[in-house]
Image (spheres, grey):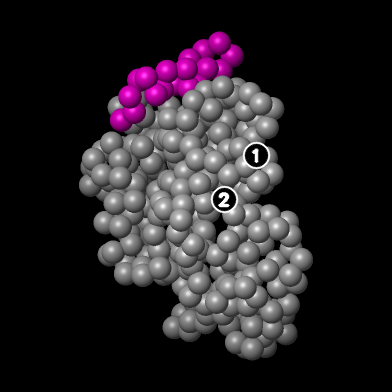
Amino acid sequence: MKLFLFTLSLAGSRIVFGQVENKSNKMVTDNSFQTVLDKTVDNKKVFGASFAIKKDTMVWKGASGNLSIDQPYFIASTTKLFTTAIILKLRAESKLSLDDKISKYIDKSILSGLHIYKGKDYSEELTIKHLLSHTSGLPDYFQGKGTSGKSLENEITEGNDQFWTFEQAIERTKKMTPLFAPGTKGKANYSDANFQLLGKIIENITHKSYAENCLEFIIRPLGLTKTYLYQDSTDQTPKTLFYKRNELNIPQAMTSFGADGGMVSTSNDMLFLLKHFLLESYSQPNTSMNCKNGIKYFFP
């Protein structure tokens, strides 16, 4: 869901480290951050900005333009962090392995014909790790062109708000050509279809909705008071997205993304989540993940 990451940055959601040294070794002050924040909002490409900053024991929050410090907004593809956290939680509970074939959790009728590359059917060879690391080779149902010659992204930004189900997202994916065989060395392709599938795997293992899993595993334990999965198209709590200079009112689409981009949150909640996610990931032994500069990344 790259469009909405881009749109989110235009709305001004950014997380940076606060009170850091500049080249002259002078400490950047809180006022300096607010000044930068205010200058970012030009009402042409950026209409609002929200920051949550933490450095050691120092915490600073700021907002400018059409966003306030506690204003919820669509976090778009950052939702994938929630999905990843739940998958890793299920792995820690031995309810799945990252090397599991997704055919273990997804009905064959859904997988049938999903990944046919150069005449070979890889649909039942896809693993959870392939989905998490975007090395499945699956096309992106959102940005890839459909039978109409347009992508969902094109249709939505042209004002055609619409709803789709998990099954419809996968069917749309099947009508597109995969880019490579799963796990091909040196190959990766960002695809929202990967996380649609991960969301369904979570639901099938837990027998609970994706929203319930987010509440149980993340939102309630961490006390995230302004974070939730967007499910009601009449809900006007999140700040409206922008595309270029125009408001992008697409509530039906935002209820459709789910595990790949449907969460609402605030910068402060997200900073708190990120802190705990990294601490939890770093503290768990994990032979399937490599560590670089204190942050873990997935590798096939």
Secondary element under disc 2, as helix, strand or loop, is: loop
Amino acid on which the number 1 mark rests in the picture = Glu
Q: CA distance from mark 1 to mark 2?
A: 11 Å
For the question of whether residue 294 can be seen, the reply is no
**Rendering coords of residue 21 (x, y %):** 64, 81
Residue at (43% x, 30% y) in the render:
167
**Rendering coords of residue 219 (x, y %):** 33, 62
For the question of whether residue 256 can be seen, the reply is yes
- Is residue 107 on the magenta stretch? yes
Residue at (27% x, 64% y) in the render:
221
Q: How many marks?
A: 2
The answer to whether 191 is drawn above or below residue 85 in the figure is above
Secondary element under disc 1, as helix, strand or loop, is: helix
Amino acid on which the number 2 mark rests in the picture = Ile
Identify residue for label 2.
Answer: 250
* Highlighted range, magenta: 105-123
Residue furthest to the front in view is: 234
Q: Residues within 10 Å of mark 2 (few under 14, many from 20)?
A: some
Identify residue for label 1.
Answer: 155
